[in-house]
Image (tube, coloured by chain):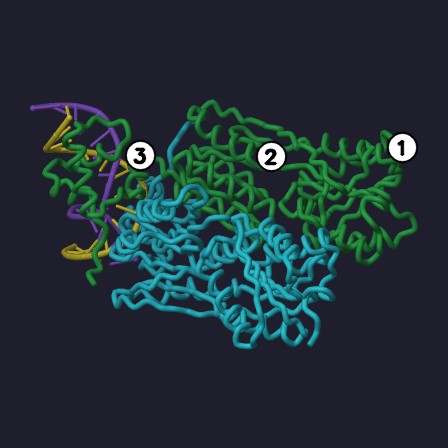
Chain colours: A cyan, B green, C yellow, D purple
DNA sequence: TTGTATGCGTTATCAA
DNA sequence: TTGATAACGCATACAA
């Protein structure tokens, strides 16, 4: 079996009896080629199995078509669904996604961004973690677009997409109030990311405004187990809450299983629960969780459309988009 | 803001007062550079913010460092966890993952593979769907390694990784038998992928060997909803099974919620259930599902280690790896 | 160890 | 519309 290398435009040109530029033009949308030569090139290419080398194209055009997705915990329901939508939209816009997993150590977001630079990615979308200022600058200086999703950085030339976490938190308090709950709880992880903390702060503030006590519990990594642990802690304490806002659906699932199985409570009769993210499991029969939906489609849409419009990002203007997380009513909050 | 382009090795060389090859060698592991020049280059590179252009490097070296992950339904628990492990291992071996989402239409696996060729990916890992023979040949002819996970193709030069689905199915029948179940059921989707069908066939065969009747139900897309629908169908029929093997954990979750909520059955007292995949939700309190674990780590490990050893794949030898799916005992099957 | 020269596959510029 | 030629940024064979 001949360990042959890829065929080049050169060879296609030879076979078709044209110059190599003709071949190049044939594969460049909107270039000037006659129908005739175009056809001959296409046929020769087909027979030889020619495919444009995007490495070389990227080199001369100075655009690789690559967009980096920088993410940790990518097996998490919310993250993976965002990833799916993002890759899909990216491909639809003629780009391709390079995903970099930052699960390992800490400075890994910086390393991920360096990888993005090495491959001359046109943009990097950061779903988790926070890169160093200096490397952000480096990206920007070289014309790489940057998108931060649910992060907190203030910076020129960056697109930041956040949610109205505080509004959602207020809505949750509202719902609990109408359900006649008077002892609130907030179940959070110890991660302390901006969005998680914004939900907590908004919840606490709105509760205070209504004169409601709220028991805040922060523990462990954001996930199912953390919800169970918090359930144990909260329900063992002197003052059991009758309504709990969980910072995340995963936490909420753990919390629900905990209060049901370890304390025999029934939901929403004994305790009302609201989550955040609207992961698929939230709609499962065992949970039917009332929650707030991450506008995943909108996030992806805004992101790639920003790539399109801001070819002129020489202006350096950054944008902050605050998207709305809509409440999805299911069965874990008593009707008002 | 100066829309400056990336700095090149040329500029670094100038600043450091060396030749451009010295710079190249500094960033080539195992090249011959003196400590002195190496240091000067490194410093100049640091100050200028230089990063090797992997597009150009890939061009000359004929290896891009890119591996394509071709996948559909990537937001599914099993898929996303495989994706996570794969990206992680790939990065650890100095490569980078390009993920291509094939959710859309059908021929999209072929298009994905073309994309892989265009970017001169060193390998493509196919997690779902089945590419055309001709394009497989094209990849192979150009020295691109191919890995098929849970697919069925017989072909030279390909690494195929399958599971011992039939053995697992036998084990499930065994477990049901010891739990004194005598009316079996198999809950499958209508997808008809090789691994799903292998589990079904293995289950049916082993049941027959023991003289046990088995009710097979196939319906819809592989997922939670399909499990619920099948529960409705199976439990409404004349002969209710007292043990059901679900082709997938997702199906099992739907099935469990269905039989509990719509038919008031209790698990495992009234009916025993076994799933497949061992997704995270299988361990959640609401399910505690007895299931078979996908050896995700092993799959990823074997894959990237195959990349390493088979630099000499001129031999054209393909491999078939059959990995073991171990049974994870939880609480949905009565003890024997 | 270092520098020079050449090639990798493509696109862009310029004449024809 | 077409072809020749010069980049693009890097690696490497070869000579020094």
Which disc is residue B76 wearing?
A: none
Q: Quadrant of residue A274?
A: bottom right
| Residue with the mark numbered 3 | B61
Looking at the image, tell me whether mark 3 or mark 2 is earlier in sequence order. Answer: 3
Mark 1 to mark 2: distance in Å? 31 Å
Work out which residue is located at the far right of the displayed protein and give it: B238
Residue A180 is left or right of residue B7, and the answer is: right
Q: In front of the other: label 1 or label 2?
A: 2
Looking at the image, tell me whether mark 1 or mark 2 is earlier in sequence order. Answer: 1
- Res. A222 visible in picture: yes
Q: Crowding near pointer 1: few (<14 within 10 Å), some, many (20+)?
A: few
Mark 3 to mark 2: distance in Å? 34 Å
Chain letter of the residue beneath label 1 in the structure image: B
Q: Position of residue B47 (x, y in %)?
A: 18, 46
Chain letter of the residue beneath label 3 in the structure image: B
User: Between residues A2 and B81, which one lies in front from this camera angle?
Assistant: B81
| Residue with the mark numbered 1 | B211
| Residue with the mark numbered 2 | B295
Q: Are marks 3 and 2 in contact (CB under 8 Å)?
A: no
For the residue labelled by badge 3, is the local secondary structure a helix, a strand or a loop?
A: helix
Residue C10 is left or right of residue B138, and the answer is: left
């Amino acid at each position: 079996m001949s360990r042959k290398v890829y065929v080049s435009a050169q060879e296609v040109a030879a076979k078709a009896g044209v110059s190599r530029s003709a071949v190049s033009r044939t594969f460049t949308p909107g270039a000037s080629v006659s129908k005739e030569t175009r056809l001959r090139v296409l046929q020769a290419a087909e027979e030889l199995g020619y495919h444009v080398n995007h490495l070389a194209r990227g080199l001369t055009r100075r655009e690789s078509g690559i967009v980096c997705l920088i993410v940790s915990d990518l097996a998490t329901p919310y993250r993976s669904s965002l990833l799916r939508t993002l890759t899909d939209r990216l491909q639809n816009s003629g780009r391709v996604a390079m995903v970099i997993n930052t699960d390992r150590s800490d400075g890994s977001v910086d390393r991920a961004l360096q990888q993005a630079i090495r491959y001359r990615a046109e943009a990097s979308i950061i779903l988790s973690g926070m890169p160093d200022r200096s490397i952000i600058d480096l990206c920007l200086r070289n014309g790489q677009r940057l998108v931060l999703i649910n992060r907190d950085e203030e910076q020129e030339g960056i697109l930041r997409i956040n949610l109205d976490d505080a509004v959602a938190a207020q809505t949750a308090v509202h719902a609990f109030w109408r359900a006649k709950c008077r002892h609130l709880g907030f179940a959070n992880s110890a991660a302390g990311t901006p969005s998680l903390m914004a939900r907590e702060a908004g919840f606490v503030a709105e509760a205070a405004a209504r004169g409601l006590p709220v028991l805040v519990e922060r523990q462990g990594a954001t996930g199912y187990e953390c919800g169970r642990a918090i359930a144990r802690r909260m329900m063992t304490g002197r003052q059991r809450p009758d309504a709990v806002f969980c910072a995340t659906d995963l936490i909420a699932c753990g919390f629900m299983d905990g209060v049901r199985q370890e304390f025999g409570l029934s939901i929403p009769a004994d305790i009302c629960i609201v989550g955040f993210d609207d992961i698929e499991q939230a709609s499962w029969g065992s949970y039917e969780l009332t929650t707030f939906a991450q506008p995943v489609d909108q996030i992806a849409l805004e992101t790639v459309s920003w790539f399109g419009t801001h070819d002129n990002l020489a202006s350096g203007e950054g944008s902050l988009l605050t998207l709305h997380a809509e409440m999805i009513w299911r069965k874990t909050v008593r009707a008002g």
